Image (cartoon, rainbow, N blue to C red):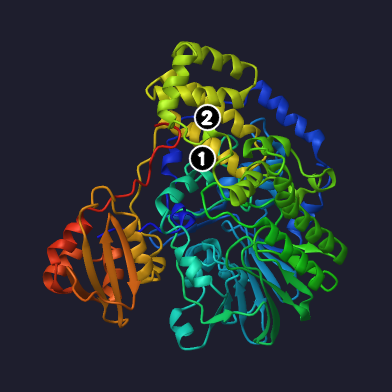
Amino acid sequence: MPSFRLSALALALILSPAYAEQATPAKPASEITRERNQAWLQRLPFSDRADFDNARRGLIEPFGGVVENAEGQPVWNRMAYNFLDGNDAPASVNPSLWRIAQLNNISGLFEVRERVYQVRGMDLSNMTIIEGDSGLILIDPLISTETARAGLELYYKHRPRKPVLAVIYSHSHVDHFGGVRGVIDEADVKAGKVQVIAPGGFYEHAVSENVLAGPAMMRRAQYMYGSLLPRDERGQVDAGLGKGTPSNATVTLIAPNVLIAEALETRNIDGVEIEFQLTPGTEAPAEMNMYFPQFKTLCMAENATHTQHNVLTLRGALVRDSKVWAHYLDDALVRYGDKAEVLFAQHHWPTWGGNEIRDYLADQRDMYAFLDSQTLRLINQGLTPTEIAARLQSLPPRLASKWYSRDYYGSLSHNVRAVYQRYMGFYDGNPANLDPLPPEDAGQRYVAAMGGADAVLQNARQAFGAGDYRWAAQLLNHLVFAEPDNAAARELQADTLEQLGYQSENATWRNVYLSGALELRQGVAEARARNGAPDMIRALTPSMFFDYLAVRIDAMKAADEDLLINWRFSDLDEDYALTLRNGVLTQRKGARHAQADVDLSMTKALLDRIALKETGFLKEATIGGIEFESGRLKLLKLLGGLDEANPQFNLVTP
């Protein structure tokens, strides 16, 4: 029976930082890196401290401790980031990135305005608490039950212990719903005592995102969030949107019982009027902004944060539509710009004042519109993705000077390439790039053409010494893939990636570079088997389960094995007709084959237990938990031959 690997972010959370604790010591910044980082101090208005005032505004109690899980393991350790407090940027961190890392380090319970509170800095996202007439409305209960529970208890230390009457999921990413069981009981939801409110399409997207490509996304998320790096000035300092993701965390999900379906929909929850504005296809496929008229307060979910966001995340996902994103930002500006006195989002700190809010929304709109229009302009001049990224070195000057437009999470460089991908796909139009050699084959040929490994190393050392790190990385990548056991090449490539990381303004780029350097020196960490998201597994529909089976079948090995399968879920009263033909598994819901090779019946609840490894498919097929009319051995043979995903595949070596 196949095991499941869900949400890349959800599963990156549960990795222990133990690997980082034994990390090979990082090297210092080179003199060239030191000089380049120092130059940033003249490029941006570092004397502007308004964001620090806003990030501290309304602070009731800071949080500087450790959150543990039921086994006593640390889930969130704010103290690990104490090295950031009160210090100037070291040579190993871009000063602009150091600035946002310090801002994201301002954590605790905050009053946004009367009856509106936020818990910030207790994992990647914020939890917002709205005081109703008799209870609480929570927006986005963080990533894990442990941090969400700790955040709510921090609030209760200072405010009346009213019951939670509603939880609102602003959108379908796990850092905005994973802690829900830490703040409410599902029995109260089923009894109608608690509302769980979400945008239409939330549940499908929350469960399905990253399922089919989950193992690959999980692996890349380790690099993106720096989950295996030490927390220090030569390691992970931030994640751009927040400090980082918890480890050893429990990720949960309770299905919404109220869906917002209309483009604009107003509801009164415990005396609080909320206007919901659906924004599908923006930062998430299912997302919504919220306006609170009686508080003159606007929640922008994750559509407007204090950074340029991702059009395509480095961990992988479907490409987002920056044009649609800009449209909904403009719509929010028109609807609420003259009304709102406070704007908050589910990352970073709020914005106060009508003029500031209008400028902020307009600038964020212009930023995403720029990405779309200017990439298309250069596409139509015949430029390739790499050429466009080289041409568009900066946003327009006035926009580039705004701190909330900087490249802390997304970046101009990779976002314009994502826009290209959305419109044009992987192929840049040059026939030489239509069918390139794979990295190992190309590497061997490049090394031979350059005169062998010693010549490549010599050229790379010259490039490194001159501070031409991007070129050194490209040269050494060919050599490492041609000769993965070449210790000198691996070490110099690690040194090169390290300096690129130290110079990066973008938190995720830094984490990717430094993670690559770490693994070149230390090897790939072993995967830890821990099921951190059972609610996500139980939420899989049978169709999603069969889709996951399909991507585990080696089509060439199964090309001659035709099977017709009738699969019934007795507790759902649902039938599925599966066809294995030409090595491809397809499905039809609500259908049955007239004559099937395999005919079985089971409960969806049993399938969940098998997926959670609480029992086994073979065991249940033997003891009768799964009832076969025919084809028992044929199905067991099919399931036994499925490919196993590699959760820790190589990235910087073959």
Q: Is residue 506 left or right of residue 16?
A: right
Q: x, y percentage for residue 548?
A: 35, 60
Amino acid marked by disc 1: Pro
Quadrant hosting residue 116 = bottom right
Q: Is residue 88 visible?
A: no
Amino acid marked by disc 2: Ala
Density class for disc 1 (Cα within 10 Å; few <14, some 14-19, many ≥20) is many
Residue at point 38%, 66% (across, down): 544
Nearest to the observer: residue 127 or residue 205: 205
Q: Is residue 286 visible?
A: yes
Residue that lies at the very extreme toward the right in this rendered image: 355
Secondary structure of the residue carrying tag 1 is: loop
Q: x, y percentage for residue 221?
A: 49, 48
Residue at point 67%, 83% (across, down): 132
Residue tagged by mark 2? 26
Residue tagged by mark 1? 230
Nearest to the observer: residue 128 or residue 260: 260
